[in-house]
Each structure stands twice: as C-alpha cells, then as structure tokens.
Amino acid sequence: MAKEPGRTLIAQNKKARHDFHIEDTFEAGLVLTGTEVKSLRQGRASLVDGFADVDGDEMWLHNVHIPEYTQGTWTNHAARRKRKLLLHRHEIDKIADRVHQKGLTVVPLALYFKDGRVKVEIGLAKGKKTWDKRQTLATRTAEREKEQALGRRLKGMDD
C-alpha cells in the first residue's frame, strides 16, 4: 500500500477543548497492532474518555476506544487496551515534570494519519471551571455575531 501524503483526520476530541485549557501540544506516534490500523482506516475511533499517563520511563494512552476490526479473526485486539506512545525522552521528561509540578493532565486531542502512520496529538491541559465554560461560550457567540454583522454591512444589507 502506498503512503498517503499529508494529514488525514480519524477522530477529534472536541469535548477536551471545551472542558480544558490546553497549554501545550505534542505529536506522538502509537504502537498499534494490524487490526487496530485497519479499524482506524475505516475511520472508527473515539477519544472522549482518553488520557495519557507516564509510567516509569514510558508514556501510555488509556481509554481510547478503537473498535474491533469487523473482518478480524482470533487476532483481533481489545477495544480499550492501553497503548504505548512514542515520544522522545526529553519530551516525556518535560511532560512528566509539568504534570507533577503544576497538576496538569494529558489528554488526546486528535488522532490522524500523517504520511501513512498513525499519530496522536496530545495536550497538557488544566481543567476549566463551570463559569470558564460559560464565559468561553459567551465570547465565542459574541465573536460570531460580530463577524456576521460585519459581513452583512460589507454586503450592503441592513442590520
């Protein structure tokens, strides 16, 4: 199979950007089995309850749901198994320090193919309070209304 150039999105975690302040992002590779890759090529995955954790010298991705491959046999994978993340040592150390010192958490933001390989975008995140979520929603709504009014004005329509 030829490599696919560019980035093809498989799954995105929109809830993470709503529930957390994302401070920093990293791109990591994933250690997967063959049936997991085939299932991802069908565009089936969920990042909603996922999180990453540093265990010793390695980083692991937990609770990411990649459903079983429909045509898989006894070689099929478990849907919610923990998967190893492929990062450089200095990136793992940086993430571990910030998680332990600042009380941040690591959440997956997107899962995608990049030049034929599966990558996951993880973010160092701090939880939002309820009023933060309402304030973000109000700001986004006001910005959208401002853009719409500007567009109507440029087209010569009345408000």
Image (cartoon, rainbow, N blue to C red):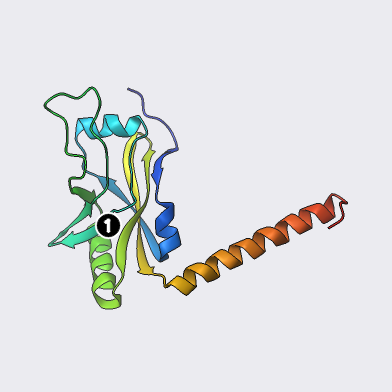
| Rendered residue at 88%/51% (across/down) | 156
Q: For this view, does 68 lie left or right of residue 140?
A: left
- Indicate the secondary structure of the residue bearing disc 1: strand
Displayed quadrant of residue 24: bottom left
- Residue 90 is situated, as x and y percent measured from the top left of the image, at 25, 63
- Residue 68 is situated, as x and y percent measured from the top left of the image, at 23, 33
| Rendered residue at 32%/58% (across/down) | 107
Displayed quadrant of residue 2: top left
- Residue 127 is situated, as x and y percent measured from the top left of the image, at 37, 69
Pick out the residue farthest to the bottom. Answer: 101
| Rendered residue at 38%/36% (across/down) | 115
Tag 1: Cα neighbours inside 10 Å, few (<14), some, or many (≥20)? some
| Rendered residue at 38%/41% (across/down) | 112
User: Compared with residue 118, is residue 27 higher up or lower down, i.e. above or below?
Assistant: below
Instruction: State the residue position of label 1.
Output: 51
Between 130 and 106, which is closer to the camera in this rendering?
130
Q: For this view, does 135 lie left or right of residue 27?
A: right
Between 52 and 28, which is closer to the camera in this rendering?
52
Displayed quadrant of residue 76: top left
User: Compared with residue 32, is residue 41 higher up or lower down, i.e. above or below?
Assistant: above
- Residue 125 is situated, as x and y percent measured from the top left of the image, at 36, 66
Between 123 and 77, which is closer to the camera in this rendering?
77
Q: For this view, does 136 lie left or right of residue 148?
A: left
Question: In which quadrant is the C terminus drawn?
Answer: bottom right
Question: In which quadrant is the N terminus drawn?
Answer: top left
User: Compared with residue 7, is residue 140 higher up or lower down, i.e. above or below?
Assistant: below
- Residue type beneath disc 1: Phe
